[in-house]
């Protein structure tokens, strides 16, 4: 049965619609839309040799940070993050690695999420190793919040350290995050 009409209008229907509009307006941020975004940074710009000995083996190229030495080299990379409450946290961190020579080699990257204050360190470490084929396409190592103890919703302080074998390279790092764009 429909609402009764008064002067050609349905007051109950109008009141219900007004209530829905007011409830949606009061919801505020909960009704906000999110869009998935990516920050992609070349390894040559955000990664450095972990020590001067390792740095001497590395060549910083526009498309990669390459180990041109004959021994393993460690590189440390600090990524953008937003540790504020309600800040944009990462949903995925990716490191693209490859081999620039004709040789096959292993690359191990350790994802780190946390911080160090003075002598106190509060961080988690998640290493992954992948075999890269010389002359082949690069390979991706990825980490997501589910891999972190306590299963947080986001990653807020991402960093990566990689062990590059001779002839291997770290091409770029990417952070995927959700950004609130309004309702």
Image: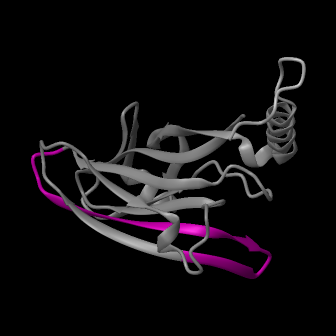
Instruction: Please say if 100 is above or below 120.
Output: above
The answer to which quarter of the image holds residue 181 is: top right
Residue 9: percent from left, percent from top: 83, 22
Report the front residue among 114 and 45: 114
The answer to which quarter of the image holds residue 109 is: bottom left
Snapshot colouring: one colour
In the displayed structure, does residue 176 sit left or right of residue 171?
right
- Magenta stretch: dominant SS? strand
In the displayed structure, does residue 111 sit left or right of residue 129?
right
Instruction: Please say if 66 is above or below 75.
Output: above
The residue shown at (36%, 40%) is 64
The residue shown at (41%, 62%) is 162
Quarter placement of the N terminus: top right
Residue 75: percent from left, percent from top: 46, 58
78 part of magenta stretch: no
The residue shown at (77%, 36%) is 3
The residue shown at (59%, 80%) is 150
Residue 42: percent from left, percent from top: 46, 38
Q: Which residues are magenta?
A: 101-124
Report the front residue among 10 and 27: 10
110 part of magenta stretch: yes
The number of callouts visible is: 0
Residue closest to the far top: 8
In the displayed structure, does residue 97 sit left or right of residue 131?
right
Quarter placement of the C terminus: top right
In the displayed structure, does residue 154 sit left or right of residue 139?
right
Residue 57: percent from left, percent from top: 36, 53
């Amino acid at each position: 049965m429909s609402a009764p009409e008064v002067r050609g209008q349905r007051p109950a229907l109008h009141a219900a619609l007004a209530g829905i509009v007011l409830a949606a307006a009061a919801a505020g941020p909960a009704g906000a839309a999110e869009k998935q975004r990516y920050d992609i940074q070349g390894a040559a710009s955000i990664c450095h040799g972990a020590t001067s000995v390792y740095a001497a083996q590395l060549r910083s190229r526009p498309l990669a940070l390459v180990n041109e030495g004959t021994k393993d080299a460690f590189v440390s990379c600090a990524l953008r993050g937003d540790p504020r409450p309600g800040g944009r946290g990462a949903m995925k961190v990716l490191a693209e690695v490859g081999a620039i020579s004709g040789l096959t080699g292993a690359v191990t990257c350790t994802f780190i999420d946390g911080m160090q204050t003075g002598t106190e360190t509060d961080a988690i470490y998640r290493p992954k190793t992948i075999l890269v084929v010389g002359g082949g396409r690069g390979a991706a190592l990825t980490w997501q919040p589910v891999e972190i103890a306590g299963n947080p919703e986001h990653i807020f302080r991402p960093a990566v350290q990689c062990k590059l074998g001779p002839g291997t390279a770290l091409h770029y790092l990417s952070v995927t995050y959700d950004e609130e764009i309004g309702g």
